[in-house]
Image (cartoon, helix red, strand yellow):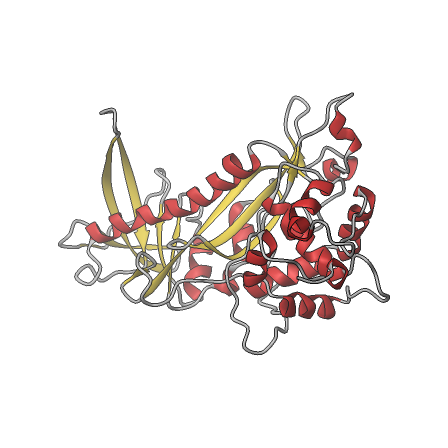
Amino acid sequence: MVRVAAGVFAPGHLGELTQIVPFELVDAVLAETGRVQHRLRELPSRVGVYFLLAMCLFPEVGYRLVWHKMTSALAGLPAVASPTAKALRDLRRRVGAAPMRALFEVLCGPLAQPVTPGVRFGRYRTVSFDGCSSLKVPDTGRNRAWLDRLAHGGYPQLELMTLVETGTRAMIGAVFGPTAIGETDYARRLLHLLRPDMLVLWDKGFDGNDFLAAVTDTGAQILGRLRSNRRAPILSRLADGSYLSVIGTVNVRIIDAQITVTCADGTVFTGSYRLVTSLTDARRHPAEALVGLYHQRWEHESAYYALRHTLMRGRVLRRPGRPGAGDVGAAHALPVAAHRDGRRCRIPAGHRPGPLLLHHRAAKRPRPGDPSRRRDMR
């Protein structure tokens, strides 16, 4: 336990956080992004990075209370700083988005080991694409000029596209922008993260001919859902009921399935699914196994559910200005960071990246006379 001014924290909430994001890694990203303080400060840049991450851990409280929770183990020591909300706001702005983005780029990626259960189908690691268009940002002029705005005076919204490892829900990459841009256009920006040992799952809407060809060109395999109005030629019927076909220039296999779900109260839902896959060998990859595997795509939906309904709960992302393209992480208005063409930050030798808490702090719009207006909520 040492001085807060030195940027080191006592065990507790931050003690657990520093096991995932060690001091050496924070110092490395600050140095690379040019955000190391130029003079001795009571609130150095390293403290700012952990403060931004702590905001993710305590989304319901203001700056001062976040700081109190960070330093509670140091209570009573004369060396502990007691900054104002304005000082903490200035610290956040001084650190900026660049170190948080670089931190994400170090820590994002698959987490599962080869023996981790539920993450592989044969020799393939299962990953998925999915978008989320229900993230709201502050209703400012700059945001309205850049993003779509909901009808009836609603908040502007962001489109978030992520590539996730389904078995662990680990974030491999993410991009965001206006909702007017299609999901597949955003997903194309993440194709460089695909590898030949990956099997990509996606829902209907990603089945465009060009996108299908772009994914297979990476060497990755696909298993996705086709829209009901898609028609593909039947080239050859296979023993398991599936058939070989072609979509655009890609040879594929199509599986028609009836899915029945029985709820705990006895309610039964039935739906027709048409799946497309580049795994054309029916003996090695039977249709029944692939239909069961497609259920793993809902791991991605579960991750978004946690973001929208557990952490966000309809609140507006906390940042007054426009979240610039590529500006992300805990310092900006998104729960994840955009991956910049595979660029990686230099990290200390021997450091093994682990998972990172990337969910962003959100704030409700204060009502007139609300005491929360006196906090630094902007």
Give the quarter of the figure containing the N terminus: bottom right
Instruction: State whether residue 226 is above or below residue 37.
Output: above
| Residue 322 placement: quadrant | top right
Describe residue 13's horizontal placement relative to residue 35 as left or right: left
- The image shows residue 268 at horizontal and vertical percentages of 24, 27
- Between 109 and 353, the residue placed more toward the observer is 353
Instruction: State whether residue 288 is above or below residue 313.
Output: below
Residue at image point 72% right, 32% down: 139
- Between 233 and 22, the residue placed more toward the observer is 22
Instruction: Single out the residue that lies furthest toward the bottom.
Output: 349
- The image shows residue 257 at horizontal and vertical percentages of 23, 42
Residue 1 visible somewhere in the drawing: yes
- The image shows residue 352 at horizontal and vertical percentages of 51, 70
- Between 368 and 162, the residue placed more toward the observer is 368
Give the quarter of the figure containing the C terminus: top right
Describe residue 217's horizontal placement relative to residue 84 as left or right: left
Describe residue 150's horizontal placement relative to residue 118 as left or right: right
Instruction: Single out the residue that lies furthest toward the left.
Output: 239
Residue 328 visible somewhere in the drawing: no
